Amino acid sequence: MSAGPGRRPLVAGNWKMHKTIGEAEAFIQALLPRVSAGAHAEVAICPPFLALPAMVDSARGSRVQVYAQNMHQEQAGAFTGEVSPAMLVEAGAHGVVLGHSERREMFGESDKALALKLPAALAAGLVPVLCVGETEQEREAGETERKLRRQVQEDLAQVETERLGEVVIAYEPIWAIGTGQVATVEEAQEAIAFIRALVADRSGEEAERARVLYGGSVKAENAAELLAEPDVDGALVGGASLDPESFAAIVEAAG
């Protein structure tokens, strides 16, 4: 693994809408012995809301952290079906995934909303993982950089400059999520280096601190090659994170 200087790699497993509490308990008991050795990379699982407290309890004392998959920016209010930063903190969550392409495409998550959510997560002491990425049509039209520029600039607009390095950014080419297609290592490195340059437009120092992950059909078979790229600081793993053995192998590839 060759994350940049001072950047500790992160491998996070996004379970999406998978695993009951019982299934989550079986997973964590199988995972923990497989990731007990080695402590270089940070490891996180992102279970559904209902399994969060159980996973926090089961992972306590291990290297595995627990992140949520979404949150609302307000601390409380008339927002039926939403979960606040304070609720996540009380449940023991360490971080939160924000702006996943499925949230953007299926549930109307906007850059305007994300601009509010990111500072709210940081204020609550949660590590935000901001997801950005282009569709296949946008890539074919040569619009990858335009799309990434808009998402990164708008979503981070209200984050204080000196805190930009605390935001984890996950580059997830939408055409590679759940499709089995994977960006080539050159495509991943190029896009992630571009994302880091966008952060550097505001602060070169914070851009060097910020971790940028790759996500999109990451598997044990391709993880080591992707993670060896100089700007790739880890992975946001989807389907392969549902199996403890596969997920542990990706963690091992990160060091």
Image (tube, helix red, strand yellow):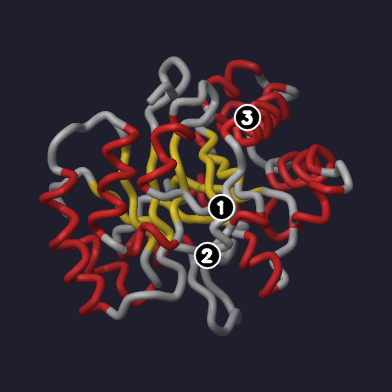
Can residue 187 be seen at all in this image of the molecule? yes
In the depicted view, which residue is nearer to us: 112 or 134?
Answer: 134
Please report contact status of discs 1 and 3: CB closer than 8 Å, yes or no: no
> Where residue 212 sits: x, y (%)?
54, 35
Q: Secondary structure at mark 2?
A: loop
Which residue sits at x=57%, y=76%? Answer: 77
Between the residue at mark 3 and the residue at mark 2, the CA separation in whole angstroms equals 33 Å
Q: Which residue is mark 1?
A: 120
Q: Secondary structure at mark 1?
A: helix
> Where residue 179 sits: x, y (%)?
58, 62
Q: Mark 1 packing: few (<14 Cα in 10 Å), some, or many (20+)? A: many
Q: Which residue is mark 2?
A: 71
Q: Secondary structure at mark 3?
A: helix
Please report contact status of discs 2 and 1: CB closer than 8 Å, yes or no: yes
Q: Name which residue type carries label 2.
A: Met
Q: Which residue is mark 3?
A: 186
Closer to the observer: label 1 or label 3?
Answer: 3
Between the residue at mark 2 and the residue at mark 1, the CA separation in whole angstroms equals 9 Å
> Where residue 143 sits: x, y (%)?
85, 44
